Image (spheres, rainbow, N blue to C red):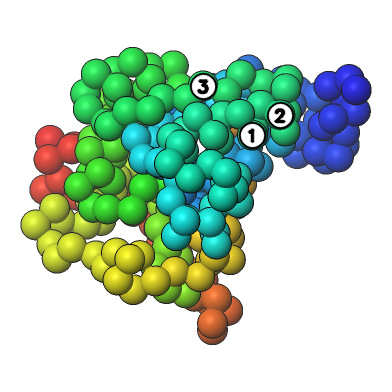
Amino acid sequence: MTDAARYARQIVMPAIGEAGQRLIGDSRVVIIGLGGLGNPAATYLAGAGVGTLELVDHDAVALSNLHRQFLFRDTDLGRPKAEVATERLTDYNPDIDVRAHVTRLDESVFDALLPGAAAVLDCTDNFPTRFAINAACARHRVPLILGAAIGVQGQLGIFRHDLPSAGCYRCLFDETGEAAEACEDAGVLGPVVGMIGAWQAFETLRLLIEDGEAGSRWLHFAPETRTIRAHEIPPDPACPIHA
């Protein structure tokens, strides 16, 4: 099967075409977190033909993951998520380069992976990690697509760190605020993380074909009421990231 045949259903779209497909194929994207958000996000980006996917996760597959993390099987229990996801995505699309990084985040990881990346997807599930990823993306001027989900609520953040006049995650949330509920306590419905992860992939592809948001935005999705609330995120003069 040729590249044109594999990607024919998106190449035929006027917004993408052959030029857009080349942009996608020439891009390198970093995905941090291979859980409920990272599974669909990575799968759709692999299917779209993103040239290089860097998958970062220090965690191992657990039984409680399987109801929403469809890249994993019972036979994968105890194995590193990044390694299993790399194997599955390489089988899914052997045209692309998928790289596993089984490691905890620190400055050396950011400094190794972020320079030259077209986008970073934050698919993690805690505030301290999100603040660290946001600061690293700001330092390296890399757009950040952040997803979050708890219960039946989902959020999506598009932070254009590559633009000088766009706000960031730290402009929106204070690091001294209360910790958010964890999935272990509040639970999460599988389709909700699936929708948010797919949305992250969609916004990433928009960036890659140079049709992304012209600024930073925060969106809240409530499937039960079928509502989406969105607002722009301007830079906060008091934000230390923009100091």
Which of discs 1 and 3 lies nearer the camera? The answer is 1
Say which residue label 1 marks: 88
- Mark 2 lies on a secondary structure that is helix
Residue 37 visible in the displayed image: yes
* Closer to the camera in the image, 40 or 63: 63
Circles 1 and 2: CB atoms closer than 8 Å: yes
- How many angstroms separate mark 3 from mark 2 (CA)? 13 Å
Q: Residue at x 54, y 34 (%)?
A: 84
Marks 1 and 3, the one that precedes in the sequence: 1
The residues tagged by marks 1 and 3 sit, at their Cα atoms, a distance apart of 12 Å
For the N terminus, the image quarter is top right
Q: What is the crowding at mark 2: few (fewer than 14 residues within 10 Å), some, or many (at least 20)?
A: few
Residue at the image point whose x is 21% and y is 23% from the top: 107
Amino acid carrying label 1: it is Arg
Q: Is residue 205 visible?
A: no
User: In this view, which residue lies farthest toward the front?
Assistant: 75
Whether residues under marks 3 and 2 lie with C-beta atoms below 8 angstroms apart, the answer is no
Could you tell me which secondary element the residue under label 3 belongs to? strand
Residue bearing the label numbered 3: 99
The x, y position of residue 35, in whole percent, is 46, 49
Against 128, residue 161 (above or below) is above
Disc 2 residue type (three-letter): Asp
Label 3 vs label 2, nearer the camera:
2
- What residue does disc 2 label? 91
Q: Is residue 67 above or below residue 79?
A: below
Looking at the rendered structure, the kind of residue marked 3 is: Arg
**How far, Cα to Cα, is label 1 from label 2?**
5 Å
Give the image location of residue 128, x and y in percent.
20, 47
Q: Quadrant of the C terminus?
A: top left
Residue 162 place in picture, x, y as percent: 39, 30
Which residue is painted at 39% across and 71% down in the image?
A: 187
